[in-house]
Amino acid sequence: MPHSLSMPLLRELCFAFVAGAPVAAPAGAASASAQDAIGGPESRSPPVIAIVDVTLLPMDREGALPHVTVITRGAAIVAIGPTSGDGAVALPAGATRIDGAGRWLLPGLIDNHVHCLDPRDLVLHLAHGVTTVRNLKGAPWHLELREAIRRGERIGPTFLTAGPFLNEPQFRTPEQFESEARRQADAGYDCLKMHGDLAEEAYERLFITAEELGLPLVGHVPRNLPLKTVLEIGPMAEISHAEELVYTHFQPLRTEGDARAIPGCIELLKAAGTALTPTLVAFENIAPQVEDLAAVLASPAAQLLPPAARELFGPRINHYVRRFRREDCAWLRSSREFQARIVKAAHAAGVPVLLGTDCGIPVVVPGVAAAKELENLVGAGLSPWEALAAATVRNGDFLQQSPPIGRIAVGATADLLLLDADPLADIAAVRRVAGVMSRGRWFGRQELDQLLAARAASFAPETALAPLIAVDSTKALLTAVRALPRAADGRRPLDDAFLFSIWQVYLNANLPHLAAEVLACIEE
Ligand SMILES: [Zn+2]
């Protein structure tokens, strides 16, 4: 199982990204079938796994069922039933048996809003029970990553991705928005992500094009337009932050913080059939960074980040520290609470509330953030079951995968999360991960810990290099990288993901000349 992109592949990805061209799969990769991915190339029959005598949260209906056995075959759930007595499920010969007694089984969690810059994040998601992620700013290498995971060449959650952001000033005319949306559909992206301003005519054209293409239009509400105008022109499939509602409904109406204006907002969402992903965990993380960034970076969760991310989120580069002052923190906190009230009202009115974290921005840690957002949804007034539904069946229904995800039902994808404690009694139990199944592949606690340890070990050579990252120059960093002694096979003692993630940071920051310098170094 490769844990980092191979150099030739990385090279191909880099060039394809620079050229803006779709990336072809590596030679020979297309011949691997889905079954091969699960059972290994020589395996004819996919592995059968039985999780025996567990308390089951199927999530396609409320509540939990005690003493249930669930059987998976390859990437599918094939049987569910009582462990003993009438209608007991027979254990197929040769099935791997996992003891579920005293444990709780639910579908793997779905984080519908991540930003993946470092492919080593994938293991972090998985180890925290997240079995599907949707990346909301995509590049061609994300499509390649999605396919590598699909083929079973890389361990990780099922990966979905938007394309590049659709907004001004990158695109201006309705024609430009339409042609970019069509280009992204042709490239194979899973949804269209807005992030910034759009003129009314451009939004209308984008909406019509998205409908034609059958791709969900998601993301930020164009902040130059009122929510009402946007949803009346054409309903977005999903709004990716509760924060966006504050800017496009409450602020234009001068009712920010006024709970009496909430029903009007919810009416608009309800009439449009638009889903809401609150990402409270992302917003609530801003004030603590502004007040005491060192404390945030000293948190146990932040220790899971790669050295490059810790540096980018650190005091030299962190954009929140630049953008906000201490006196903004009172507003940030009261807005966070107001957003939670919007979430509660949206949920009560039947607006689909979905779980997403925005992890990958400072300092939102993949996997850890999903557990925190579940607690946030409960804090906002959802029951533990309803919060889990936001992370499983509602996200699954929204993402419309085939076979379905986000539920434990015969025929659904075998994405499972086994817990040592009852999440319906206390949602914090989602942190007590006993094991995870990802498309039929089982990872017990020990195996998850081994994956995490291997991931952490890969960071060691980066610790001394990361402080050399600078926003205006690559010189110090690349000089140090070039000075590293090479192994006999010519490789640097450095995971490819390190320079790769920095290359993307420069590209995202619209610094193509610095990105090109990093790329040249990767190429050497
Ligand atoms: Zn985001």
Image (cartoon, rainbow, N blue to C red):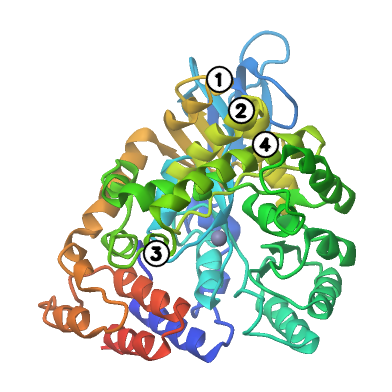
**Of label 3 and label 1, which has the lower sequence position?**
1
Q: Earlier in the sequence, mark 3 or mark 4?
A: 3
Q: Of the residues under marks 2 and 4, which one precedes in the sequence?
A: 2
Question: In the image, is residue 98 above or below residue 300?
Answer: above
Q: Which residue has dot 2 on it?
A: 70
Residue bearing the label numbered 4: 341
Q: Amino acid at mark 3?
A: Asp
Residue 118 bears which disc, if any? 3
Which residue type does callout 4 highlight?
A: Arg
**From the image, which quarter does the C terminus lie in?**
bottom left
Mark 3 vs 4: CB contact within 8 A: no
Query: In which image quadrant can residue 320 be found?
Result: bottom left
Which of the two marks, 3 or 1, is nearer to us in this view?
Answer: 3
Question: Within 10 Å of the Cα at label 4, are there few (<14), some (14-19), or many (20+) other Cα atoms?
Answer: some
Q: Residue at x 55, y 67 (%)?
A: 147
Q: Nearer the viewer, mark 2 or mark 3?
A: 3
Q: In the image, ligand 1 is in what quadrant?
A: bottom right
In the rendered image, which residue does mark 1 sit on? 54
Q: Amino acid at mark 1?
A: Val
